[in-house]
Image (spheres, rainbow, N blue to C red):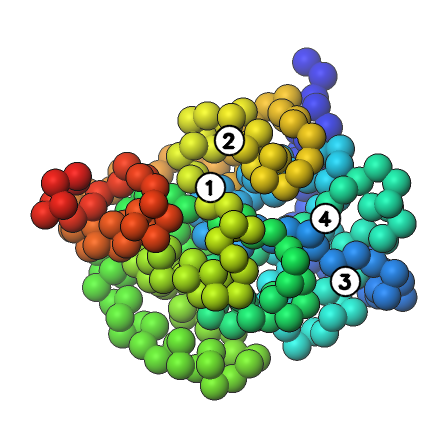
Amino acid sequence: MVATKAEATRWLKDQVSAQRRRQLVSTRLKARAVTAGLRALPDFLIIGGQRCGTSSLYKHLGAHRQVVPSLRKETEYFSTRFGEGESWYRSHFPLRTRLAVGHKATFEATPDYMLDPRAPGRAADLVPDARIIAMVRDPVERAYSQYQHNRRLGHEPLTFEEALAAEGERIAGEIERLSADQNYRAIPLRRHAYIGRGMYADQLRGWFGFFPPERTLVVKFEDLIESPADTMRGIERFLGIDDWIPPTFTNHSYGRAGRTVQTPMPEPTRKHLQAVFAPANRDLETLLDRRFGWSVDEADGSG
Protein backbone atom coordinates (compact mmCIF):
# COMPACT_ATOMS: atom_id res chain seq x y z
CA MET A 1 0.00 0.00 0.00
CA VAL A 2 1.31 3.45 -0.92
CA ALA A 3 1.51 5.78 2.06
CA THR A 4 -0.15 9.18 1.84
CA LYS A 5 1.95 12.31 2.28
CA ALA A 6 0.48 12.82 5.75
CA GLU A 7 1.32 9.24 6.74
CA ALA A 8 4.84 9.56 5.40
CA THR A 9 5.33 12.85 7.27
CA ARG A 10 4.07 11.30 10.49
CA TRP A 11 6.37 8.29 10.09
CA LEU A 12 9.36 10.58 9.50
CA LYS A 13 8.45 12.68 12.53
CA ASP A 14 8.36 9.55 14.67
CA GLN A 15 11.95 8.76 13.73
CA VAL A 16 13.22 12.05 15.17
CA SER A 17 13.33 12.78 18.90
CA ALA A 18 11.28 15.65 20.31
CA GLN A 19 14.47 17.39 21.38
CA ARG A 20 15.92 17.14 17.88
CA ARG A 21 12.69 18.45 16.35
CA ARG A 22 12.80 21.46 18.67
CA GLN A 23 16.40 22.11 17.64
CA LEU A 24 15.47 21.99 13.97
CA VAL A 25 12.56 24.39 14.45
CA SER A 26 14.79 26.78 16.41
CA THR A 27 17.36 26.74 13.61
CA ARG A 28 14.68 27.47 11.00
CA LEU A 29 13.26 30.30 13.10
CA LYS A 30 16.64 31.97 13.30
CA ALA A 31 17.04 31.75 9.53
CA ARG A 32 13.56 33.14 8.92
CA ALA A 33 14.05 36.03 11.37
CA VAL A 34 15.93 37.93 8.65
CA THR A 35 12.67 38.24 6.71
CA ALA A 36 10.37 38.66 9.73
CA GLY A 37 9.25 42.11 8.59
CA LEU A 38 8.01 40.62 5.32
CA ARG A 39 6.02 37.87 6.97
CA ALA A 40 2.29 37.73 7.65
CA LEU A 41 0.56 37.60 10.99
CA PRO A 42 -2.10 34.93 11.59
CA ASP A 43 -5.57 35.41 10.16
CA PHE A 44 -7.02 33.08 12.77
CA LEU A 45 -6.01 31.41 16.01
CA ILE A 46 -6.98 28.04 17.43
CA ILE A 47 -6.88 28.92 21.13
CA GLY A 48 -7.60 25.54 22.75
CA GLY A 49 -8.58 23.81 24.85
CA GLN A 50 -6.00 21.20 25.70
CA ARG A 51 -6.88 17.61 24.75
CA CYS A 52 -9.83 18.88 22.70
CA GLY A 53 -8.65 18.01 19.20
CA THR A 54 -6.50 21.04 18.42
CA SER A 55 -3.70 18.90 16.97
CA SER A 56 -6.06 17.17 14.57
CA LEU A 57 -7.70 20.41 13.49
CA TYR A 58 -4.28 22.02 12.99
CA LYS A 59 -3.27 19.15 10.69
CA HIS A 60 -6.57 19.15 8.79
CA LEU A 61 -6.59 22.90 8.17
CA GLY A 62 -2.84 22.96 7.50
CA ALA A 63 -3.40 20.59 4.57
CA HIS A 64 -6.01 22.90 2.99
CA ARG A 65 -4.72 24.33 -0.32
CA GLN A 66 -5.68 27.89 0.67
CA VAL A 67 -4.09 27.78 4.12
CA VAL A 68 -0.47 27.96 5.30
CA PRO A 69 0.08 26.71 8.88
CA SER A 70 2.61 28.15 11.29
CA LEU A 71 6.07 26.58 11.33
CA ARG A 72 5.10 24.68 14.45
CA LYS A 73 1.67 24.15 15.89
CA GLU A 74 2.09 25.78 19.30
CA THR A 75 4.04 29.03 19.20
CA GLU A 76 2.86 29.88 22.76
CA TYR A 77 3.60 33.52 21.93
CA PHE A 78 0.57 35.08 23.60
CA SER A 79 1.08 32.93 26.70
CA THR A 80 4.60 31.90 27.75
CA ARG A 81 6.81 33.10 24.85
CA PHE A 82 5.67 36.74 24.67
CA GLY A 83 9.11 37.97 25.69
CA GLU A 84 10.57 36.63 22.44
CA GLY A 85 9.14 39.63 20.61
CA GLU A 86 7.07 40.22 17.48
CA SER A 87 9.86 39.41 15.00
CA TRP A 88 10.29 35.97 16.58
CA TYR A 89 6.53 35.41 16.31
CA ARG A 90 6.36 36.53 12.69
CA SER A 91 9.14 34.09 11.84
CA HIS A 92 6.61 31.27 12.33
CA PHE A 93 4.46 32.44 9.42
CA PRO A 94 4.77 32.63 5.62
CA LEU A 95 5.90 35.61 3.58
CA ARG A 96 3.03 37.94 2.71
CA THR A 97 3.81 37.40 -0.99
CA ARG A 98 2.99 33.72 -0.59
CA LEU A 99 -0.45 34.55 0.75
CA ALA A 100 -0.99 36.90 -2.19
CA VAL A 101 -0.63 34.13 -4.77
CA GLY A 102 -3.32 31.56 -4.06
CA HIS A 103 -3.33 31.19 -0.29
CA LYS A 104 -5.91 33.00 1.80
CA ALA A 105 -4.90 32.50 5.40
CA THR A 106 -2.27 31.46 7.91
CA PHE A 107 -2.74 30.40 11.52
CA GLU A 108 -1.36 28.76 14.66
CA ALA A 109 -2.85 26.62 17.43
CA THR A 110 -1.85 26.97 21.09
CA PRO A 111 -4.16 25.24 23.62
CA ASP A 112 -2.83 27.31 26.53
CA TYR A 113 -4.35 30.48 25.08
CA MET A 114 -7.73 29.55 26.55
CA LEU A 115 -6.23 29.06 30.00
CA ASP A 116 -3.84 32.04 30.18
CA PRO A 117 -5.71 35.28 31.04
CA ARG A 118 -2.92 37.34 29.44
CA ALA A 119 -3.46 35.84 25.99
CA PRO A 120 -6.67 37.61 24.81
CA GLY A 121 -5.37 41.13 25.37
CA ARG A 122 -1.99 40.36 23.85
CA ALA A 123 -3.63 38.81 20.79
CA ALA A 124 -6.03 41.74 20.40
CA ASP A 125 -3.12 44.20 20.41
CA LEU A 126 -1.26 42.40 17.61
CA VAL A 127 -3.96 40.67 15.52
CA PRO A 128 -7.19 42.54 16.35
CA ASP A 129 -8.97 41.32 13.21
CA ALA A 130 -8.15 37.65 13.66
CA ARG A 131 -10.86 35.02 13.86
CA ILE A 132 -10.86 32.73 16.86
CA ILE A 133 -11.57 28.98 16.99
CA ALA A 134 -12.08 27.42 20.42
CA MET A 135 -12.27 23.64 20.72
CA VAL A 136 -14.24 22.25 23.68
CA ARG A 137 -14.87 18.72 24.90
CA ASP A 138 -16.89 17.05 27.62
CA PRO A 139 -14.81 18.38 30.53
CA VAL A 140 -14.96 15.05 32.36
CA GLU A 141 -13.35 13.25 29.42
CA ARG A 142 -10.99 16.15 28.80
CA ALA A 143 -9.71 16.09 32.39
CA TYR A 144 -9.00 12.37 32.27
CA SER A 145 -7.31 12.66 28.86
CA GLN A 146 -5.05 15.40 30.26
CA TYR A 147 -4.22 13.20 33.24
CA GLN A 148 -3.31 10.25 31.01
CA HIS A 149 -1.21 12.59 28.85
CA ASN A 150 0.67 13.83 31.92
CA ARG A 151 1.28 10.28 33.06
CA ARG A 152 2.75 9.35 29.68
CA LEU A 153 5.08 12.34 29.85
CA GLY A 154 6.12 11.61 33.42
CA HIS A 155 4.58 14.83 34.80
CA GLU A 156 2.04 13.21 37.12
CA PRO A 157 3.02 10.86 39.99
CA LEU A 158 -0.42 10.80 41.63
CA THR A 159 -3.50 8.74 40.90
CA PHE A 160 -6.27 10.59 39.09
CA GLU A 161 -8.33 10.88 42.26
CA GLU A 162 -5.31 12.15 44.20
CA ALA A 163 -4.53 14.67 41.47
CA LEU A 164 -8.08 16.01 41.53
CA ALA A 165 -7.96 16.37 45.30
CA ALA A 166 -4.58 18.12 45.14
CA GLU A 167 -5.50 20.53 42.33
CA GLY A 168 -6.56 23.43 44.54
CA GLU A 169 -3.31 23.39 46.48
CA ARG A 170 -1.17 22.81 43.40
CA ILE A 171 -2.50 25.79 41.43
CA ALA A 172 -3.20 28.17 44.31
CA GLY A 173 -2.12 31.71 43.45
CA GLU A 174 -1.15 30.86 39.87
CA ILE A 175 -3.57 33.30 38.21
CA GLU A 176 -2.36 36.08 40.50
CA ARG A 177 1.26 35.29 39.59
CA LEU A 178 0.39 35.51 35.90
CA SER A 179 -1.09 38.95 36.42
CA ALA A 180 1.91 40.14 38.43
CA ASP A 181 4.65 38.73 36.16
CA GLN A 182 4.25 39.01 32.41
CA ASN A 183 6.95 36.36 31.90
CA TYR A 184 5.63 33.81 34.40
CA ARG A 185 5.18 30.36 32.81
CA ALA A 186 2.66 28.97 35.32
CA ILE A 187 3.76 25.37 34.88
CA PRO A 188 1.69 24.06 37.84
CA LEU A 189 -1.42 25.67 36.34
CA ARG A 190 -0.72 24.36 32.85
CA ARG A 191 -0.03 20.82 34.00
CA HIS A 192 -2.44 20.29 36.87
CA ALA A 193 -5.60 22.34 36.20
CA TYR A 194 -7.64 19.24 35.42
CA ILE A 195 -10.87 20.87 36.58
CA GLY A 196 -9.80 24.46 35.90
CA ARG A 197 -9.23 23.88 32.20
CA GLY A 198 -12.80 22.63 31.85
CA MET A 199 -14.38 25.93 32.95
CA TYR A 200 -14.93 26.96 29.35
CA ALA A 201 -17.46 29.75 29.88
CA ASP A 202 -15.12 31.73 32.14
CA GLN A 203 -12.28 31.34 29.66
CA LEU A 204 -14.41 32.35 26.67
CA ARG A 205 -15.66 35.44 28.46
CA GLY A 206 -12.06 36.57 28.69
CA TRP A 207 -11.75 36.28 24.91
CA PHE A 208 -15.15 37.85 24.23
CA GLY A 209 -13.90 40.93 26.06
CA PHE A 210 -11.45 41.50 23.19
CA PHE A 211 -12.88 39.58 20.23
CA PRO A 212 -16.62 39.77 19.50
CA PRO A 213 -18.52 36.49 19.70
CA GLU A 214 -19.42 36.69 16.01
CA ARG A 215 -15.71 36.32 15.17
CA THR A 216 -15.37 33.32 17.46
CA LEU A 217 -16.33 29.77 16.53
CA VAL A 218 -16.72 27.23 19.33
CA VAL A 219 -16.23 23.73 17.96
CA LYS A 220 -17.26 20.65 19.87
CA PHE A 221 -14.58 17.94 19.90
CA GLU A 222 -17.22 15.21 19.75
CA ASP A 223 -18.59 16.73 16.52
CA LEU A 224 -15.14 16.70 14.91
CA ILE A 225 -14.80 13.01 15.79
CA GLU A 226 -18.34 11.87 15.00
CA SER A 227 -19.17 14.14 12.02
CA PRO A 228 -15.79 15.32 10.72
CA ALA A 229 -16.87 16.29 7.20
CA ASP A 230 -19.79 18.45 8.32
CA THR A 231 -17.74 19.99 11.10
CA MET A 232 -14.89 20.84 8.74
CA ARG A 233 -17.28 22.49 6.30
CA GLY A 234 -18.66 24.67 9.08
CA ILE A 235 -15.15 25.71 10.09
CA GLU A 236 -14.16 26.46 6.49
CA ARG A 237 -17.22 28.63 5.92
CA PHE A 238 -16.50 30.51 9.14
CA LEU A 239 -12.97 31.18 7.83
CA GLY A 240 -14.11 32.08 4.31
CA ILE A 241 -12.11 29.36 2.57
CA ASP A 242 -13.23 26.74 0.07
CA ASP A 243 -14.97 23.58 1.21
CA TRP A 244 -12.40 20.79 1.34
CA ILE A 245 -12.33 17.45 3.07
CA PRO A 246 -9.10 15.66 4.04
CA PRO A 247 -8.68 12.22 2.45
CA THR A 248 -8.61 10.76 5.96
CA PHE A 249 -9.54 12.10 9.39
CA THR A 250 -6.59 10.83 11.39
CA ASN A 251 -6.52 11.52 15.12
CA HIS A 252 -3.27 13.48 15.58
CA SER A 253 -3.61 13.88 19.35
CA TYR A 254 -0.93 11.35 20.22
CA GLY A 255 2.76 11.11 19.47
CA ARG A 256 4.90 8.03 19.88
CA ALA A 257 4.42 8.00 23.66
CA GLY A 258 0.66 8.28 23.35
CA ARG A 259 -0.18 5.18 21.35
CA THR A 260 -1.23 3.14 24.34
CA VAL A 261 -4.51 1.78 25.66
CA GLN A 262 -5.99 4.06 28.29
CA THR A 263 -7.32 2.66 31.56
CA PRO A 264 -11.05 3.38 31.88
CA MET A 265 -12.03 6.07 34.37
CA PRO A 266 -13.56 4.61 37.56
CA GLU A 267 -17.31 5.16 37.53
CA PRO A 268 -17.48 6.83 40.97
CA THR A 269 -14.85 9.33 39.80
CA ARG A 270 -16.82 10.00 36.62
CA LYS A 271 -20.01 10.68 38.57
CA HIS A 272 -18.13 12.98 40.93
CA LEU A 273 -16.71 15.01 38.02
CA GLN A 274 -20.08 15.18 36.29
CA ALA A 275 -21.49 16.82 39.40
CA VAL A 276 -18.50 19.17 39.66
CA PHE A 277 -18.79 20.31 36.04
CA ALA A 278 -22.60 20.47 35.82
CA PRO A 279 -22.91 24.18 36.80
CA ALA A 280 -20.05 25.15 34.46
CA ASN A 281 -21.62 23.24 31.58
CA ARG A 282 -24.94 25.01 32.16
CA ASP A 283 -23.07 28.33 32.23
CA LEU A 284 -21.50 27.52 28.86
CA GLU A 285 -24.83 26.58 27.33
CA THR A 286 -26.36 29.82 28.57
CA LEU A 287 -23.42 31.90 27.33
CA LEU A 288 -23.55 30.44 23.82
CA ASP A 289 -27.29 29.65 23.71
CA ARG A 290 -26.41 26.14 22.60
CA ARG A 291 -26.80 22.62 23.95
CA PHE A 292 -23.68 20.46 24.29
CA GLY A 293 -25.15 17.25 25.68
CA TRP A 294 -22.84 17.06 28.67
CA SER A 295 -23.89 16.89 32.32
CA VAL A 296 -25.82 19.93 33.53
CA ASP A 297 -27.64 20.82 36.75
CA GLU A 298 -30.35 18.28 37.53
CA ALA A 299 -32.45 21.11 38.93
CA ASP A 300 -32.81 22.42 35.37
CA GLY A 301 -34.50 19.21 34.31
CA SER A 302 -32.09 18.78 31.40
CA GLY A 303 -29.33 16.61 32.87
Mark 3 = which residue?
Answer: 90
Q: Could you tell whether 286 is left or right of 130 in the image?
A: left
> Is residue 112 placed above or below 267 in the rendered structure?
below
Q: Which residue is found at the position 34% from the left and 53% from the top?
A: 287
Q: Secondary structure at mark 2?
A: helix
Residue ranking furthest to the top? 1
- Say which label, 1 or 2, has the lower sequence index: 1
Residue situated in front as seen by the camera: 201 or 72: 201
Q: Which residue is found at the position 61% from the left and 65% from the top?
A: 123
- Mark 1 touches mark 2? (CB < 8 Å): yes
- Say which label, 2 or 4, has the lower sequence index: 4
Q: Picture coordinates of residue 195 (x, y %)?
A: 30, 58
Mark 1 = which residue?
Answer: 219
Q: Which residue is found at the position 64% from the left and 63% from the top?
A: 128
- Say which label, 3 or 4, has the lower sequence index: 3
Question: Can residue 20 be seen in this snapshot?
Answer: no
User: Which amino acid, by three-letter code, is at mark 1?
Assistant: Val
Q: Could you tell whether 32 is left or right of 42 in the image?
A: right
- Mark 3 touches mark 4? (CB < 8 Å): no
